Amino acid sequence: MTAAIWTDGVPVQGLGLMRLTDDGWGDSDRDPATLVQVALDEGVTLLDTAEMYGNEDIVGRALGSHRDQITLCSKFGVYRGDSGRHDDWYVRADPATVRTAVDGSLGRLGVDHLDLYYLHHRSEETPIEETVEAMAELKQAGKIRALGLSNVTLEDIRRAHAVHPIAAVQEQWSLTQRGVEDYLPTLAELGIALVAHSPMGHGVLNQNADGELAHELSRIASELGVGAGQVALAWVHQCARQTQGTVIPLPGTSSVSHLRANVAASRIELGDVDIRRLTAAV
């Protein structure tokens, strides 16, 4: 799996692009093309978007001439309802949707293949075996290089992997969202990478943590001369290095300065006592 996707080795960290918008062009800190260039300069080569985010065309323009240097990932299957409300969405994961969705993503991104293509959310209607069979057909056709799953159960993962090898599972892992830790033994057993999105709790751990956790983040950040969010991200990196499998933290940002801070966080070394106190503070 690793050799098939990351020919130069597993990336230490990825870049989530959910919030990338057209408003950033020309802004020195939020210009999409600059963001991609700086990501590459900093060694961040895994870029992640989704059909649902509505920005694949922006990502495509931002890639410019760098396509061959990037592990490009997108997702399909989650669609907004007519109301426009944040909580109004539904899942389509039938084979016909798989085939049409990938062509739409490729067209908007302006590329001929995706390196990693995820089912964005499990379906209650379509058996995951049918979805994965259709995704495997995309791989045979050269439209994708590897299959991924997101927002799924352990049973889903095993059933899907029995149909076709799954390269990566994307789930949240942060100080305040620990459920995916139950997945780690199975992912390691099956040789599936965990792509750990929102390692700073969708930004909450930057400055809005509560109680004992906020105290510990602030204390360690002050001692190290870094931000609280960097400490939270460093916690995920350090815990990931202690697992038997492959874990790639995926902090998201549309800011060049935040990107650089996130990369710096991957190099922070927390002491064992700090790790235990952060873990206990939750």
Image (cartoon, rainbow, N blue to C red):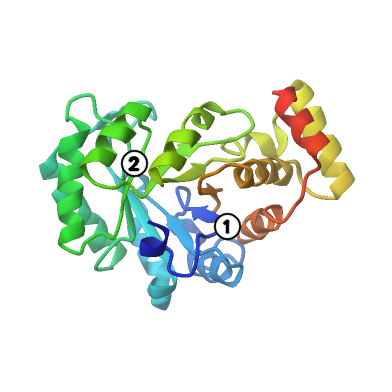
Label 1 Cα neighbours within 10 Å, binned few <14 / some 14-19 / many ≥20 = some
Residue under the point 56% across and 37% down? 202
Mark 2 in CB contact with mark 1 (< 8 angstroms): no
Reading the image, the residue beneath label 2 is: 149
Secondary structure beneath dot 2 equals: strand
Image side of residue 238 versus residue 111, left or right: right
Q: Relative to the observer, which residue lies in front, 104 or 86? A: 104
Amino acid type at mark 1: Val
Query: Which labelled disc corresponds to residue 94?
Result: none
Give the answer, above or below, for where 140 lies relative to 239: below
Looking at this view, name the residue that lies furthest to the left: 96
Give the answer, above or below, for where 59 lies relative to 50: below
Amino acid type at mark 2: Leu
Image side of residue 94 versus residue 48, left or right: left
Residue under the point 17% across and 30% down? 126
**Alpha carbons under labels 2 and 1: distance apart:** 20 Å
Secondary structure beneath dot 1 equals: loop
Question: Residue 61's x, y, as percent?
Answer: 38, 68
Reading the image, the residue beneath label 1 is: 12
Question: Residue 173's x, y, as percent?
Answer: 55, 36
Label 2 Cα neighbours within 10 Å, binned few <14 / some 14-19 / many ≥20 = many
Question: Residue 245's x, y, as percent?
Answer: 51, 45
Residue under the point 73% across and 24% down? 280
Question: Residue 79's x, y, as percent?
Answer: 27, 37
